[in-house]
Image: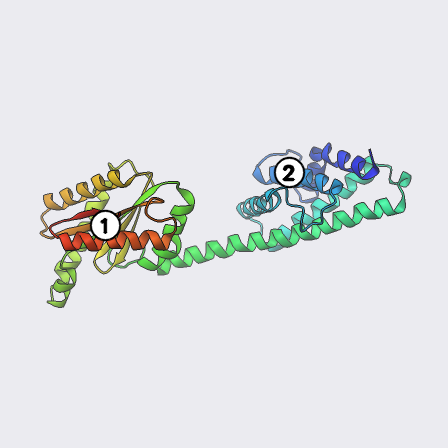
Amino acid sequence: MDRLSRIAEEVRGSVPEILALWKESRGYGNEVSGPLEQEIGRLVEVFSEFIQSSDSVETFSLGGEVRALVRRTASHQHEAGRDAVGVMEDFVVLRQSVWRLVERRVDLSAFDGREVAGFFVKMIQASDWLTERGLEAFDAIVSGEMEKALGQAAATDLLTGLPDRERFKRLLLPQAIGDHERFSLAIFDVANFSEAVAGGEVDRARETLMSLSKAIGEALSGSGSEGAVCSRFGDDEICVILPRLGEEEAYEFAERVLENIAESDTDFEVDVGISEYPVHGADAGSLVRETEKALSMAKRVGGRGIVIAR
């Protein structure tokens, strides 16, 4: 076993001690618990593998695991209430803790000066890379949360209280694609809405839209699609994401909405276009286009038509 491998083995076998040093320096207790501490420990293990690797910090990836680990760590740092300075301090103290452990457990005086220098250079490179990438990941999380919060405040329809079309297209639908292997998209359109508004029947048009929103909510309560998301998709449209439901189940859901409307005191018709992810579109844009095509066909059919994309 060469000497760098000996150092790597000492580091790998001393993760609990390094974590204890790290937590002591960061002002924590001696117990090792929680997701952040677990990820910090995994960072130490990965560093021990880097010591023995001939890769540079930019090419040492472990099949993408390193960057994924940095992102998870940044997420837990954010959850723990860190700010950017706290993130940097975490990584600086971690480097110091590794060095303190190596000084205690390894007789460096028996090493060639170049070997010690080689280890120290790798440790500095890894620490600098981790700090830079960790701050990037942390900043992305903070920026994303700020954008989401601002978007939720600004991109909300005042009449229905639902997210508006812009928020739906930029955030909600891409998020559904990332979270679910399968879901259906349904767009409900109030027939003759624009004509009613143009004719001065604004209050009646608003009432029909609110009645549609209520009918959709009632149907969702028994749809078996927990986590469904509604959005006001246009002046006269409400769009619904139905997680885990296929096109036929979404069709049945649409029928329940129309039944709820028919049983209500209001008198208006609704047309519905339906598509299924990823059957009718593998991205947000194509999925919306196919749903709108189905809705257009439903409008041509008329009379409370429900059409599935083909």
Q: Is residue 219 above or below residue 230?
A: above
Q: Which residue type does callout 1 highlight?
A: Gly
Q: Which residue is mark 1?
A: 273
Render colour scheme: rainbow
* Residues at circles 1 and 2 in contact by the CB criterion of under 8 Å: no
Residue nearer the viewer, 194 or 227: 194
Q: Quadrant of residue 184?
A: top left
Q: Which residue type does callout 2 highlight?
A: Arg
Q: Quadrant of residue 36?
A: top right
Q: Residue at x 69, y 33 (%)?
A: 16
Q: Which residue is mark 2?
A: 42
Residue 86 visible at all: no
Judge from the rendering whether residue 140 lies leftward or rightward of residue 88; answer left or right.
left
The image position of residue 185, as x and y in percent, is 29, 47
Using the numbered discs, state the Cα–Cα distance from disc 1 to disc 2 in whole angstroms: 48 Å
Figure quadrant of the N terminus: top right
Provide the secondary structure element on which disc 1 rests. strand
Q: Residue at x 23, y 55 (%)?
A: 237
Judge from the rendering whether residue 197 lies leftward or rightward of residue 220; answer left or right.
left
